[in-house]
Amino acid sequence: MIETIITGVAALTLGSAGGYLYSKKNAENQKSKILTEEMMNIQQEINNAEKNLLLLEKKETEKEREIERKERDAEKKAEKIIQSAQQEIDQTERKLEKEIARLEEREKSLDGKFSEIENQRMKVDETKEELQKKKEELEKIIDEESRKLEEIAGLSKEAAKQKLLDIIEKTAENDLINKVHRMEERMAQEVDDKARNIIVHSIQRLASDVTTESTISQVELESDDMKGRIIGKEGRNINAFERTLGVNIIIDDTPNVVILSSFDPLRRHIAAEVLKELLLDGRIHPARIEEVMHQKQLKVDKMIQKLGEDAIFETGVTGVPPEIIKILGRLHFRTSYGQNVLRHSIECAFIAESIANMIGADAELSKKAGLLHDLGKTLSHEVGGKHALLSGEIARKFQLDEDLVHAIEAHHEDVQLQSAEAYIVQAADAISASRPGARRETSEKFIKRMVELEGIATSYKGVKKCYAMSAGREMWIFIDPQQINDLKASKLSWDIARRIESEVQYPGEVKVMIIRENRFVNSAK
């Protein structure tokens, strides 16, 4: 048993030793194999490095050869350039030698010519000396002859010369005076005929009906029953209408007609439109009157813009700012001695253009100035001052051309006329105003008086608006109740009345009424 165990242990020991030896030998074989492969790889890399080194050496050799070749080529090119430059230098030297030779020959020629000129100069000097001697001899002969003539005529040389000049001057002066007189007479006749011809042609071609109703407008009614509704209970409606719109309503026995009276065409037009709207609507009471008035004022503003645009289109004027177009439209509701100012301005524009074309002036500038020359009439009763200067200020405010501004503001000679166009506008304005039937002076005096009355009242602080009513016999003055109390209102009435007495000429008497009104409105919801 023990032997068996010992044998097993010995066999196991021998097996383990044999396995260990086999494993060790196998590991050594693997290590040898790996070392061999590594050596082969290193050898391969060395071979590749040697090949790459050979290739680099070959490339370096080729580059050196290429550089040597380029250097040889560059040397050849340099030699060619040097040879070419040398040839050019040689040619230039030959040319310079020829030019120097030519200049030397020319210098010799000039020396010869200079000698000839010097000889000729000497001859000229000799000739001048001979001429001077002959001149002195001639002067002696002339002096002798002059003395002989003075002895024969009994006059000195200066006296004879002066007498001859006097005779020539007198004869020339008489001829010149006669010629100037003839030319002045002919020019005066020609200018007079030409001016008359220009004016006649302008009036014939461009005259139009420019008059308008001065102070009244008629509103037709469907029936006389409407008159009672217009008057209202105890005159409430008609009083409210007149206070709100600043016109007089005249209701008489004329069938189916109500007359609106006011010197201001704009007020009269708005009042007529408001009354027509009220009659059409059927509701006539103070609150409705004010409501319709505000609506019609907005509508009239649009109409004014349209009137201005129509005037621009009719005349063909360009470059007018929209603000000036609206001011131009307001001229439709202004009159001058009964003449509608907008139609007058349009007529002036055409007349100015016609005159400018006839005399060769700037037709476009003349036409534009003729159309805009009365813009200030829309503001003259509000701002005060001469309307021509106001027109110029309006044009200058909107940066119109200065030549145009001058032609506008000079048409009444408020500034000195300095251009042909300014004279043309002045003439066109006079032609349009002075032709038969264009104006009525009586109505203009009445309107001027109404404007003066309203202007006096509105000049006081706290006055909201003022209406000259009943042909100027009454003044309705609406004041701000916050600024003026009852005591101040009484004093204001007295002050305005005294000022009217001192500044305005008028027939009869003027009643000054101060209207102070407070309104308090609340809504129940």
Image (cartoon, helix red, strand yellow):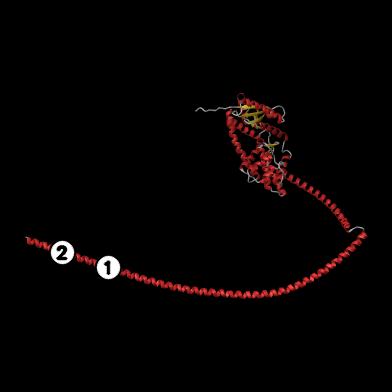
- The residue carrying pointer 1 sits among few (fewer than 14), some (14 to 19) or many (20 or more) residues within 10 Å by Cα, namely few
- On the image, the x and y values in percent for residue 105 come to 68, 75
- On the image, the x and y values in percent for residue 432 come to 71, 41
Amino acid at the residue labelled 1? Glu
Judge from the rendering whether residue 461 lies leftward or rightward of residue 441; answer left or right: left
Q: Residue at x 12, y 63 (%)?
A: 11
Task: State yes or no: discs 1 and 2 in contact (Cβ < 8 Å).
Answer: no
Residue 17 marker: 2
Q: Residue furthest top?
A: 234
For label 1, the SS is helix
Cα distance, mark 1 to mark 2? Answer: 30 Å
Q: Is residue 374 visible?
A: no
- On the image, the x and y values in percent for residue 110 come to 71, 73
Which marked residue is nearer to the observer: mark 1 or mark 2? 2
> Is residue 350 positioned above or below 158 on the image?
above
Q: Which residue is drawn at 66% across and 44% down?
A: 315
- Which of the pair 20/388 is nearer the observer? 20
